[in-house]
């Protein structure tokens, strides 16, 4: 299980938000929500995945991101650690049901 010393990264969690595109419309962007100590562990080796929507290959890696338990982190958020963006792929979960830790599967994306 996670130990406190493994929470050694500062993670800024961001929520999606509507932002002006400067031309009278809007786009989805991300706004800061909360900054927390987190642990980050790689889950898979680098792999190439075909992205149908962009018709190009991009390299992605998945991680397990762990923080102290809280109930306001959701699957539509992302975490930014050292300038790198980690998108939460599934609903965060409490691995042992004791409300000590919150774990989430994330995918790093190069944008």
Image: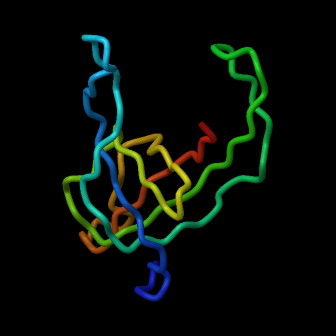
On-image quarter of the C terminus: top right
Name the spot of residue 85 as percent of width and height, x first.
52, 49
Is 79 displayed left or right of 30 in the figure?
right
Q: Residue at x 34, y 55 (%)?
A: 13
Residue located 41% across and 60% down the image:
103
Compared to residue 72, the image places residue 1 above or below, namely below
Q: Residue furthest top?
A: 24
**Furthest residue in direction bottom, as rendered:** 5
The coloring applied to the image is rainbow
Query: Residue placed at 49% from the left, 82% from the top?
Result: 6
Q: Name the image quarter holding residue 95.
A: bottom left
Residue 16 sits above or below residue 10 on the image? above
Say how many tags the image has.
Answer: 0
Q: From the viewer's perspective, is 62 left or right of 95?
A: right
Whether residue 59 is situated above or below residue 65 in the rendered picture: above
Q: Quadrant of residue 77?
A: top left
Which residue is more in the foreground, 45 or 110? Answer: 110
- Above or below — where is 3 with respect to 52? below
Residue 75: x and y, percent? 35, 41
Q: Residue most toward the front?
A: 22
Q: Nearer the viewer, residue 93 or 38?
A: 38
Instruction: Determine the image quadrant of residue 66.
Output: bottom left
Residue at 65% x, 57% y: name it. Answer: 43
Q: Position of residue 23 (x, y in %)?
A: 31, 12
Residue nearest the viewer, comparing 96 with 2? 2
């Amino acid at each position: 299980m996670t130990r406190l010393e493994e929470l050694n990264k500062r993670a800024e969690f961001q929520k999606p938000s509507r932002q002006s595109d400067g031309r009278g419309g809007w786009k989805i962007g991300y706004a800061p929500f909360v900054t927390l100590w987190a642990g980050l562990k790689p889950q898979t080796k680098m792999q190439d995945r075909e992205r149908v929507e962009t018709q190009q290959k991009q390299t992605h890696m998945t991680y397990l991101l762990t923080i102290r338990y809280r109930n306001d982190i959701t699957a539509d958020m992302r975490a930014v650690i050292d300038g790198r963006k980690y998108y939460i792929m599934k609903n965060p979960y409490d691995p042992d049901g004791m409300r000590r830790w919150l774990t989430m599967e994330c995918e790093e994306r190069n944008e």
